[in-house]
Image (cartoon, rainbow, N blue to C red):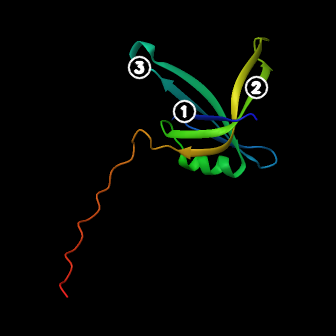
Amino acid sequence: MNRIQISGNVGREPELKYSQSAMAILKFSVADTSGRDEKKKTIWHSITAFGDLAEHAAVSLGKGTRVVVEGKLTEDTYTNKDGVEVTRMQVLADDISLSIRFGGIERIEAPAPAEEAPF
């Protein structure tokens, strides 16, 4: 089974386009950073989503949004403009979720309960 789960921050504004058959296609990158100080390392992942998932994610995601992406890891080979064959990895998303693991959501205080009337 080819499954991958990535959590990180959206690296650039997601780009929503439509195919000739009106299929929604959303492309964005996710930065997965680990380690600290000199040992800090960031891996960039290319993400592609299709259909309803692409349209819903396009409304919810922006640069810097913390996400969890689940999907299938694929390899794509193409020839660039210089005639060099390039291989890149990408994730075809099956599910995209917002992550609140490291904050980013304001805490909302509940109003104090009203005193109950005695019976």
Q: Quadrant of residue 37?
A: top left
The x, y position of residue 6, in whole percent, is 59, 34
Q: Which residue is mark 1?
A: 12
Labels in figure, total: 3
Q: Nearer the viewer, mark 2 or mark 1?
A: 2
The image shows residue 114, relative to residue 96, as above or below, that is below
Give the quadrant of the N terminus. Answer: top right
Residue density around tag 3, few if under 14, some if 14–19, many if 20 or more, within 10 Å: few
- Quadrant (top left, top right, bottom left, bottom right) of the C terminus: bottom left
Residue 87 vs residue 81, the one in the foreground = 87
Cα distance in 3D space between marks 3 and 1: 23 Å
Label 1 near label 3: C-beta < 8 Å? no
Q: Residues within 10 Å of mark 1 (few under 14, many from 20)?
A: some
Q: Amino acid at mark 1?
A: Arg
Residue for badge 2 = 75
Mark 2 near mark 1, Cβ–Cβ under 8 Å? no
Q: Report the front residue among 100 and 53.
A: 100
| Of callouts 3 and 2, the N-terminal one | 3
Identity of the residue drawn at 76% across and 11% down: 82
Q: Disc 3 or disc 1, which is closer to the eye? A: 3
First reached walking from the N terminus: tag 3 or tag 1:
1
The image shows residue 54, relative to residue 11, as above or below, that is below
Query: What is the x, y in percent for residue 54?
Result: 66, 46
Which residue is at 47% across, 36% downward? 64
Q: Determine which of the numbered discs, if any, sits on residue 36 in the image.
A: 3
Residue 18 in which image quadrant: top right
Camera-side residue of 62 and 3: 3
Q: Quadrant of residue 35?
A: top left
Q: Earlier in the sequence, mark 2 or mark 1?
A: 1
Tag 3: amino acid: Arg
What amino acid is found at the position of numbered circle 2 in the picture? Glu
